[in-house]
Image (spheres, rainbow, N blue to C red):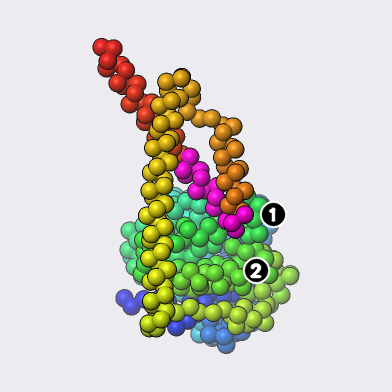
């Protein structure tokens, strides 16, 4: 089957837009008409809303399915909604929903994804899979694989950020390295950035959307509402039609390839420099591990434990301070040095283990 909705395009990003939640038939129809006039590719609206706490608006449920059907039939705009269990799939299919999406909370639970996969067996419909709430690439991959095993051929993914237990300006930290790694494994799979859920606020939507396009994401999902301040869910991250127009007008689509000899020559020169630095970096890391092994032998000879917490804290803080003086974020420097520290411990542990085996063998 030709991929109807999720074709990767060079000339324009794929745009999904619509309210966080379907609240009324009038709200849905008015928003859909406005977005249709702006050539949005796919209209989104949540019917079943998984909320953190009870007694909050959990969506209108199946009551909203006829509204989405009207959007399809009267406005001519394809529609999508979130499904969290098999019954949702059955109802959405009954009303002709064009695309199904699996939300972040559902992707986190393999049992829920499997229930949806079972309901999709024998069905030919596009499915979008959001990343799980926690930063676990394997959970995301597992969700994709379960839907693939069900026989779904038209799969796309949405990056909506991750719960990250540090104070940041984002509602959900983008942790770009995770979707980039997923894209490297599935280069032909469309990846869409849900800027609304990453930001959680309107004022930084544009910068995150542009960063996604700069990273060669294939599309953007944004929540649009006729009266965002009075929305029944996620009011702070939704925008008006006029604000949507401003957002779209501000985005710059980068060219994947440029047939310009001066550009090609310059970028190749810069890449060669990066390759050379990377080679030096590997050599330096190897030298550091050799020193770590020497320290391990010295500790073993003097019956000193491997982990020296005070020394490690001093190293990490010094690295963070130096990194910040060069414009490196604390998060980046910590992640690099924690990985180096872990590798150093493993080298020292191996030295002690091997020496212990040798000592026991010699005593036999």
Location of residue 122 by image quarter: bottom left
Callout 2: helix, strand or loop? loop
Give the residue furthest to the right. Answer: 230
Residue 68 visible, this angle:
no
Residue found 48% across the figure and 22% down from its top: 304
Residue 110 visible, this angle:
yes
The reply to whether the C-beta atoms of the residues labelled 1 and 2 are less than 8 Å apart is no
Residue found 66% across the figure and 52% down from its top: 167
Query: What is the x, y in percent for residue 188?
Result: 36, 69
Q: Is residue 352 magenta?
A: no
Mark 2 lies on residue: 204
Instruction: Say whether residue 254 is left or right of residue 7.
Output: right
- The prevailing secondary structure element of the residues shown in magenta is helix
Q: Is residue 326 magenta?
A: yes
Q: What separation in Å lies between label 1 and label 2 (alpha carbons)? A: 30 Å
Callout 1: helix, strand or loop? loop
Locate the N terminus and report the quarter of the image it occupies.
Answer: bottom left
Query: What is the x, y in percent for residue 228?
Result: 70, 72
Mark 2, Cα crowd under 10 Å, few <14 / some 14-19 / many 20+, is: some
Query: What is the x, y in percent for residue 27?
Result: 65, 77
Locate the C terminus and report the quarter of the image it occupies.
Answer: top left
Residue found 61% across the figure and 73% down from its top: 206
Query: What is the x, y in percent for residue 166?
Result: 63, 50
Q: Earlier in the sequence, mark 1 or mark 2?
A: 1
Tell me the number on the disc at residue 55: 1
Q: Which residues are magenta?
A: 325-341
Residue found 57% across the figure and 87% down from its top: 37
Q: Mark 1 or mark 2, which is nearer to you?
A: 2
Instruction: Say whether residue 223 is left or right of residue 263.
Output: right
Tell me the number on the disc at residue 130: none
Give the residue furthest to the bottom. Answer: 37
Pick the front one: 312 or 192 = 312
């Amino acid at each position: 089957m030709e991929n109807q909705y999720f074709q990767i395009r060079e000339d324009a990003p794929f745009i999904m837009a619509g309210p966080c939640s379907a609240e009324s038939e009038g709200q849905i129809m008015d928003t859909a008409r406005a977005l249709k006039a702006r050539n949005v590719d796919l209209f989104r609206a949540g019917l079943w809303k998984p909320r953190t706490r009870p007694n909050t608006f959990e969506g209108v449920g199946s009551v909203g399915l006829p509204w989405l059907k009207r959007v399809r039939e009267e406005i001519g705009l394809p529609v999508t909604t979130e499904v969290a269990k098999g019954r949702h799939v059955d109802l959405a299919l009954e009303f002709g929903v064009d695309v199904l999406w699996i939300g972040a909370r559902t992707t986190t639970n393999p049992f829920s994804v499997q229930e949806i996969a079972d309901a999709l067996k024998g069905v030919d419909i596009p499915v979008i899979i959001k990343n799980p709430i926690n930063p676990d690439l394997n959970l995301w991959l597992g969700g994709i694989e379960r839907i693939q095993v069900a026989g779904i051929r038209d799969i796309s993914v949405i990056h909506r950020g991750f719960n990250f237990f540090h104070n940041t300006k984002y509602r959900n930290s983008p942790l770009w390295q995770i979707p980039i790694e997923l894209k490297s494994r599935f280069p032909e799979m469309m990846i869409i950035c849900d800027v609304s859920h990453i930001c959680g606020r309107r004022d930084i939507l544009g910068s995150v959307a542009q960063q996604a396009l700069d990273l060669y994401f294939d599309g953007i999902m944004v929540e649009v509402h006729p009266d965002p301040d009075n929305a029944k869910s996620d009011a702070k991250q939704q925008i008006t039609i006029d604000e949507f127009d401003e957002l779209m007008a501000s985005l710059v689509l980068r060219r994947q390839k440029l047939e310009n000899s001066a550009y090609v020559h310059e970028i190749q020169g810069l890449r060669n420099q990066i390759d050379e630095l990377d080679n030096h970096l590997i050599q330096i890391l190897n030298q550091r591990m050799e020193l770590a092994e020497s320290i391990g032998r010295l500790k073993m000879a003097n019956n000193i434990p491997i982990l020296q917490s005070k020394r490690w804290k001093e190293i990490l803080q010094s690295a963070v301070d130096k990194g910040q003086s060069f414009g490196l974020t604390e998060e980046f420097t910590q992640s690099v040095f924690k990985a180096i520290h872990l590798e150093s411990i493993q080298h020292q542990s191996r030295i002690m283990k091997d020496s212990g085996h040798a000592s026991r063998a010699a005593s036999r």
